[in-house]
Image (cartoon, rainbow, N blue to C red):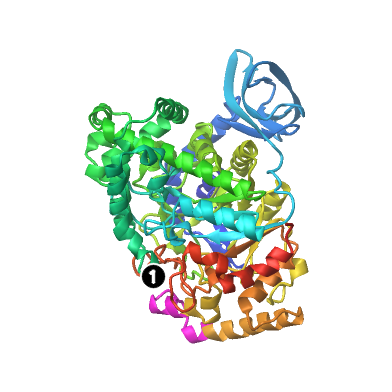
Amino acid sequence: MNDLNELAAAYGVETFYTDWRRRPADVTPDTIRAVLTALGADVSSPAAVRAELERLAHERETRLLPPTLVGYAGQDVSAAAGAELWAAIEGGGEVALTPAGRSADGSRAAYRLPPDLPLGAHTLHARLGDRTASAPLLVAPPRAPDPGARAWGFMAQLYSVRSSGSWGFGDLADLRELASWSGRDLGAGFVLVNPLHAGESAPPIRPSPYLPMSRRFTSPLYLRPEDVPEYASADPGVRRRVDELAGPVRERNRTTDDLDRDAVWAAKGTALELLHGLPRAPGREAVYAAYREREGDALTAYATWCALAEPHGADWRSWPAGLRDPASVQVAAERGRLARRVDFHSWLQWLLDEQLAGVQAAARDAGMPIGVIHDLAVGVDPGGADAWAYQDLFAQGITVGAPADEFNQRGQGWGQPPWHPQRLAASGYAPYRDMLRHVLRHAGGLRLDHAMQVFRLWWVPEGASAAEGTYVSYPHDEMLGVLLHEAHRAGAVVVGEDLGTVEPYMREVFAERGVFGTSMAWFERDSGGAPLPPPKWRELCLATVGTHDMPPIEGYLHGDHITLRERLGLLTRPAEEEFAELEPWLREWRDLLASLGLDTKDLTAALHAFLARTPSRLVGVSLADAVGERRTQNQPGTTDEYPNWRVPLADAAGRAVLLDDLPSHRRLLAAVEPVRRRSPG
């Protein structure tokens, strides 16, 4: 057992952890073995475990350089002791690295990166005797970009925010208008939206924005067909047909029926196919060609997956054997046969790139110092485009999730395969960098969902319950360095969603690197368990009342989350006990708000006035909170038992609220007035 634990430590697999109640919890040997097996270690016998330990030790002693190095100018990187190291600079030139100390066993040494080493992707070379090695070297900025003065903004699940012009689904035209209006008329500094990652290429389209087919590309559901330039130049008959397709889904905008992505895509997809078939002006054709060249093989692979998924389904693992390997001759043949569909899906991504650029430009034109903060999901669907294209970089037989916490007492399994830490590093983090670069291309900020993903993830073996997992560590210096590098290129603020079970050192590292945390009113407590008063909140954070995984303020005040979880069988104790805890907790909040001189008759406005009194540099106001919505967008631990991610924006009386209604919505204006008064502009 000692050898197994030693091997687990070598692979970054934890054998015990601290749960949400701050109690120690052991990981079962079965879980440890399953996770090590997924990482590629042979643990079939004690002798195999010892052999694996010996192999790792030999590799560590003989390797000149790690597979990839990510560092900061003026800091140290590790290499074989006694080696000669030099960096080939991106763009030309070389610089030598000097030794700065040895490891305890003398086999490794620290080498100092010159303080004036430019940011960017270089190559590190090593020579020791007759042996040589090379590895990518990414030099990252020491901190994420600073957003400047304090700012506030709306947080919105974009699909739920419809206008009179929507196709039954909030889209990029709606986001452009929301950013323009809130920036121009209300002085908002940003708007934060759910992940806009790509889903299935054909119905059925699952609703969760946090279980995408690809994080590298964007969902065409968010396109507004009328904003495609070819629509404006089309003949009247084509435009009339597009308008006819919009009619039935547009009629649903004033209802509160569950959002129907399949119906939306049936209409939008048909309209976009009509526009795809139209001739493009020579200038636009050249721009499209340049886009395809810039996106390269990644775009080709994604569009090929989309074209194959239409006849074969959205899970590549069930495709004919010859199509499961992206590099196979069968895939190449199908790519040629389906060339028009491959081009259609490539063209959609180009349109999305154009419309996303327009949204961020409109936000900045409206005076927003940040603009759109995009959200990055933790992972992808195991049958999707990313998992198909990068099969070797994902750990098989594992799903990512979270251990039990106060609001999800049975733990969570998210159905996503995790990055394989060692293989991702060996790739030079290329897919990770490309994904970040795509999300940040037209962004003023990035929200990192479950920000602990750069430190560790909760791995659950397939077939086990969410509680039967363990944490697996990632090289956070490297993961965070890549993130900071891409954020620096984009000039984008980084916000980490660091709620739940978070070790203190993680927040310390984020703060040191200029990454904002997330502080949520319902979770912020002092050492005695009382609501944390405003002066004690973090400055470097996004302050909010709640999240999309909880009911809006109106629903929380009524205990809707308790009633719902009881009905769905998600509680681990009687609902009466949950209500018995909620009532004094809300009373404490009312007392605290009253002690600050805030009017508790309108708790939504009072809570946002409370946030305005914290030192937090960013304050987020949920659109659902602001209009009085009671329903939560997502109930963790469920799939079809609750209409997750299908709830359109509505008020406390259950009436649909459109984007057109917001400028005169009294409740919303009252909710944001306190944060407006305490923000520049």
Q: Is residue 102 left or right of residue 360?
A: right
Instruction: Count all numbered tags in the image, as a single digit.
Output: 1
> Residue 182, relative to residue 396: is it above or below?
below
Task: State yes or no: residue 120 in magenta.
Answer: no
Residue 503 or residue 288, whichever sits in front: 288
Amino acid found under the numbered disc labelled 1:
Thr
User: Label 1, on which residue?
Assistant: 256
What percent of the width, then of the height, locates residue 180? 58, 53
**Identity of the residue furthest to the top in this view:** 130
The image shows residue 378, relative to residue 274, as above or below, that is: below
Given residues 22 and 390, the one toward you in this image is 390
Assess disc 1: are there few (<14), some (14-19) or many (≥20) residues with their C-alpha within 10 Å of its C-alpha. Answer: some
The quarter of the image holding the C terminus is: bottom right
Vertical comparison of 12 with 501: above or below: above
Q: Indicate whether 102 appears above or below 614.
A: above
Please name the residue shown 69% across and 65% down the image.
675
| Residue under the image location 37 percent in, 56 percent down | 167
Please identify the quarter of the rendering in which residue 322 is found.
top left
With 37 as the anchor, is 455 left or right in this view? right
List x then y, in percent, for residue 421: 51, 41
Residue 574 within the segment the image draws in magenta? yes
Most extreme residue toward the front is 236
Pinpoint residue 562: horizontal percent, then vertical percent.
Answer: 48, 79
Q: Nearer the viewer, residue 317 or 80?
A: 317
- Residue range of the region highlighted in magenta in the rendering: 563-578
Camera-side residue of 535 and 526: 535
Q: Secondary structure at mark 1?
A: loop
